[in-house]
Amino acid sequence: MRLRPVPALRAATSLLAPLLAALLLAGPVALAQQQSSIHPGEVWNDNRGLPIQAHGGGILQRGKLYYWFGEDRSQGLDPALRYVGCYSSRDLVHWRFRRRIAFADPEGIGPNWILERPKVFYNNRTRKYVMYMHLDGPLHPSEHGYRLAKVGVAVSNRPDGPYHFVRSFRPLGHESRDIGQFVDDDGSAYLIFEDRPYGFRIAQLSADYLSVEREVALLPMHLEGGALVHWHGLYYVLGSHLSGWDPNPNLYATAEHLEGPWSEFRDLAPPAERTYGSQSTFLLKVTGSRASSVVFLGDIWKPKALWDSRYLWMPLQLGDGRMALPSPQPWSINIKTGETSLQR
Ligand code: GAL
C-alpha cells in the first residue's frame, strides 16, 4: 500500500521545498551570509565563501563601513611578495572581500623579508589612507630573523588601495616590532610599538601621519600585540607577553591620560586560559544610540598552517577600571544601538 501525505503536511512541504532548494543551491556562501552572530575560533568566511585572511589586523571605520585589514596568509601566493587583505562590512559579521594588496620587498631585505600587523589610518587633512606595517627581516638575505625592527608606511587615495610604499624607519629611532594603532576621540592618531630593550611605547603620528612625531608614554613592560581604547574617560592599553605564536595570558593597564601614570598590569582573563588561545591585535569601540561596547580582536595563530589561523573576537566586560574577556561563545552586536549579547 502507498502512503499518501496528509494535506497539512503536503502544504507545509510545498511551502518549505522551494526555500530548502534555494538554500541548497546557494550553498555555504548564502548560509554564511545569513548568520547574524560572530563565532570565535570558527572558520569565518567572506562573501565569496573563502576564509577571511586578515591576521594581526585592525579596523578602520569610514561612515557606515568598517574596513578590516590584516595579513593575508593564503597558500599558493607569490613567495616574493607579502599581502594585506582588505574587507568591508556594515555589521561586523558579514565581510566583503575588497582587495588583496600586494607588496614587493621595499628595501631589498631579501627573500625572507617580513610584513606583519598592517594597520590603516585615514588622514582627514590629506584625505589619504596611511598604512603602517611591521617591516622586518634578517641582516643578511640568506638568513631568517627579525633584526631590522622597523615600520613601513604606504599611502593610498582609497581604503582598498592600490597602496604606494613611502618609506621605512625606526620610530623615534627605537626598535619597533609588533605595532598597534589608536585614534583618540579628538582624532589624534597613535602608534603603539614594542621596543625590545625598553618596553611598550605609545607615540603620536605627525599631522600627515607619515611619520611618528612625539613619544607619549613608555610602559616598561615587555609586551606585544599592542592595542588601546578610550572608554568612559579611561584609557585601556592591552598586550601579550613575548612568546612568539604561542598564546599567553594577555595583560592590560589603565590611565586617565595617555601620558600616564599607568596602573599596574592586570590579567585580561584567567591566566591558565592563556587568553583562550589567542593574542591581542586591536580594541574596537562601537558607539551606538544606547551603549558603547569594546570588542577584543585577537588572533588564534596556527604557526604550521598560518592560512588557517582563526580569530577570537569577543565583547569585553568593562567597568570600575577593570576589563575582562569572557569565555569564547557566539555573540551578536547591534551596530545602531552599540549593544552586544552573548548567546550562551
Ligand atoms: C609574535 C608576534 C607575531 C609574529 C610572531 C612570530 O610574537 O606577535 O606578529 O611576529 O611573533 O614569531
Image: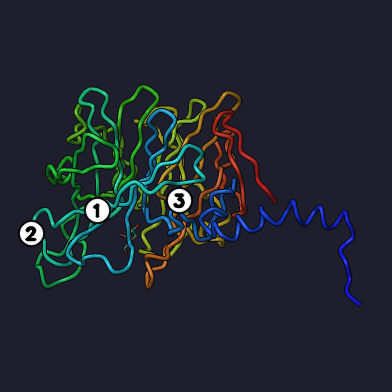
Camera-side residue of 62 and 306: 62
Task: Pick out the residue farthest to the bottom.
Answer: 1
- Which numbered disc covers residue 332? none
Left or right: where 123 falls relative to 57: left
Tell me which label, 2 or 3, sits earlier in the chain: 3
Return the residue at label 1.
197
Q: From the top left corner, tell me how far across and down residue 65 is, in percent.
A: 42, 34
| Position of residue 301 measured from the top left corner of the image (x, y, whole percent) | 42, 63
In depth, the one of 131 and 211 nearer the eye is: 131
Describe the element under mark 1 as helix, strand or loop.
loop
Judge left or right: residue 173 versus residue 257: left
Check disc 2 and report its element: helix, strand or loop.
Answer: loop
Ligand 1 positioned in quadrant = bottom left
**Residue 199 shows in this picture:** no
Residue at the front extreme of this rendering: 1
Image coordinates of residue 247 in percent, x first then y, are 45, 62
Q: Residue at x 55, y 47 (%)?
A: 314
Query: Mark 2 sits on what residue?
Result: 108
User: Horizontal placement of 15 versus 68: left or right?
Assistant: right
Q: Which amino acid does label 1 sit on?
A: Pro
Q: Mark 3 points at which residue?
A: 47
